[in-house]
Amino acid sequence: MRQFSVELDELHEKILQMGGYVESAIHRSVRALVDRDAELARQVLRDEARINQMEIEIDNLTTRLFALRQPMAKDLRFLTAALKINTDLERMGDLAVNIAQRALSLVAQSPVKPLIDIPRMAQLVESMLLRVLDAFVKGDADVARGVLLADDEVDALRDSVYTELVAYMQNDPTTVPGAVDLMFVARNLERIADHATNIAEDVVFLVKGVDVRHHAMEAKDA
Amino acid sequence: MRQFSVELDELHEKILQMGGYVESAIHRSVRALVDRDAELARQVLRDEARINQMEIEIDNLTTRLFALRQPMAKDLRFLTAALKINTDLERMGDLAVNIAQRALSLVAQSPVKPLIDIPRMAQLVESMLLRVLDAFVKGDADVARGVLLADDEVDALRDSVYTELVAYMQNDPTTVPGAVDLMFVARNLERIADHATNIAEDVVFLVKGVDVRHHAMEAKDA
C-alpha cells in the first residue's frame, strides 16, 4: 500500500513538471511575440519534444497503475483525472507552439499595432494555468472553481481583440496578414484557457467526486 | 467474465453512437454553411446537449468498469482508449458547434465567395471520422494508419483556403468579417481532422499495443 502511494506521488510530481514545461512554453511564446524575438520562438518549437515525451511517460505510468493496482474511489478518480489532465496539458503545449509559429511569421512583417489586449489575455491565461495546477496540488475545489470563472474574462478580451483587428484590416489592407496572425494568437490563448477550464473541472471531480462539466446535473434533468 | 464482455460491448456501442451524433453535427454544420440555412445551424446548437450528455455517460461507464473489474492487457487498453476517444469526440462536437455559429454569422452577411475548398475539406474530414470509427469497430490498425495519412491533405487544403481568403480581404475590405468567419471554419475543420488523428493513434495503440503519438519511438531515441 505504501508502495502505491509512492507511485501516485511520482505521477503527481510528473504532472506538475509537465505543467511547468507547458507554462514556460506559453510564457515564452507570448514574450517572443511581444518582443519580436525569433530565437525565443524557435526555442519553444525545439522544446515541444520534451512535452510530448512527458505526455507519453505520464500515460504509461498511469496505465501501469491501473493495471497493477486495483484503484478504488479517490485513487481511481485520480488516475482517470491524470489521463485527462495530461491530454489537456499536451494540447496547451501544442497551442503555445502555434503561438510561437505566429510570432515567427509576425517578426517577418511590420508591426500591425501596439499589443495591449493580447499580453493581458496571456497574463490571465497563465494565471489560470498556475492556479489550476495549485488547485490540483492542494486538492482545493474552490480554487479550481475560481479558474472556471476567469474563462469569461478571457472570452471578453478575445472579442475585443477580434473587433479591433477587423477594423484594422478594413482600414488598411496591408495589415491583413499580420492581423490574421494576431487573431489566431488570440484564438490559441482562448483555447489554452478552455483547457485550463477542463483541468479545473477534473480537479473538482477529483476532490468532490462531482462532475461539473456541461453543468452535468442540468443535462441530466433535461 | 461473460458479464464483463457484455459491458464492454455496451461501451463500444455507446462510443459508436456518440461518433454518429458527432458525424451528424459536423455534416449539418457544413451544410448549414453552404446552403446558408440558419435553421439547420440552430439545430446543431440544440443537439449539442445530447453529445455532452453522452460524453458523461461514457466516462461514467468507463470509470465504473475500471473500478469494478480489474482489467488487464487488451481490456485495459480498451478502457483507457475509450476515455481518450470520448474526449476527442466531444471536442469534435464543440468544433461543429463553432462552425454552426460561424454559419449563422455568415447567413447574416453577403456571401464572400463561392465555397469550394471548404466543402472539400469537410468531406475529407467526415470521411476521416467515419473511417476511424470503422477502424475502431473492426480493430483494424491499417485503416487507422490510413486516417493518419489523410491529415496532410486537410492541412494543404487549409493553407490554400487561408491564402485565398487573405487575398479577398486585401482586395475588398468589405469581405473582412465574412472572410474571418470562413478562416475559422477552415481552422475548425482542420482541428476536427486532428482529433480524428488522435483517435486513429488510440486505435493503433488499442490493436497493436504500440504508441504512435509524436513518433514515440523517435522521441525516445532523441
Image (cartoon, coloured by chain):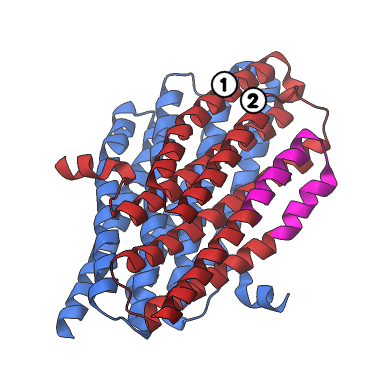
Chain colours: A red, B blue
| Residue at the image point whose x is 69% and y is 24% from the top | A116
What residue did someone put label 1 on?
A160
Q: Is residue A40 magenta?
A: yes
Label 1 crowd (10 A; few <14 / some 14-19 / many >=20): few
Q: Is residue A24 magenta?
A: yes
* Residue B135 location (% of width, % of height): 39, 71
What kind of element bears circle 1? Answer: helix
Question: Is there a contact, CB below 8 Å, between mark 2 and mark 1?
Answer: yes
The amino acid type found where label 1 is placed reads Ser
Q: How many marks?
A: 2
| Residue at the image point whose x is 24% and y is 68% from the top | B64
Horizontal side, residue A214 vs residue A138: left or right = left
Give whichever of discs 2 and 1 has the lower sequence position.
2
Q: Chain of mark 2?
A: A
Q: Is residue B121 visible?
A: no
Residue span colored magenta: A21-47
* Depth check, front residue: A189 or A212: A212
Q: Is residue A125 visible?
A: yes
| Secondary structure mostly taken by the magenta-highlighted segment of the chain | helix
* Depth check, front residue: A78 or A178: A78
* Depth check, front residue: B148 or A134: A134
Q: Is residue B14 above or below residue A154?
A: below
Horizontal side, residue B53 vs residue B31: left or right = left
| Residue at the image point whose x is 56% and y is 59% from the top | A16
| Residue at the image point whose x is 45% and y is 43% from the top | A197
Q: Residue B16 appears in which quarter of the rendering?
A: bottom left
* Depth check, front residue: B54 or A209: A209
- Mark 2 or 1: the one toward you: 2
Give the position of the C terminus of chain A as an image quadrant. top left
Residue A117: numbered disc = 2
The amino acid type found where label 2 is placed reads Asp
Label 2 crowd (10 A; few <14 / some 14-19 / many >=20): some
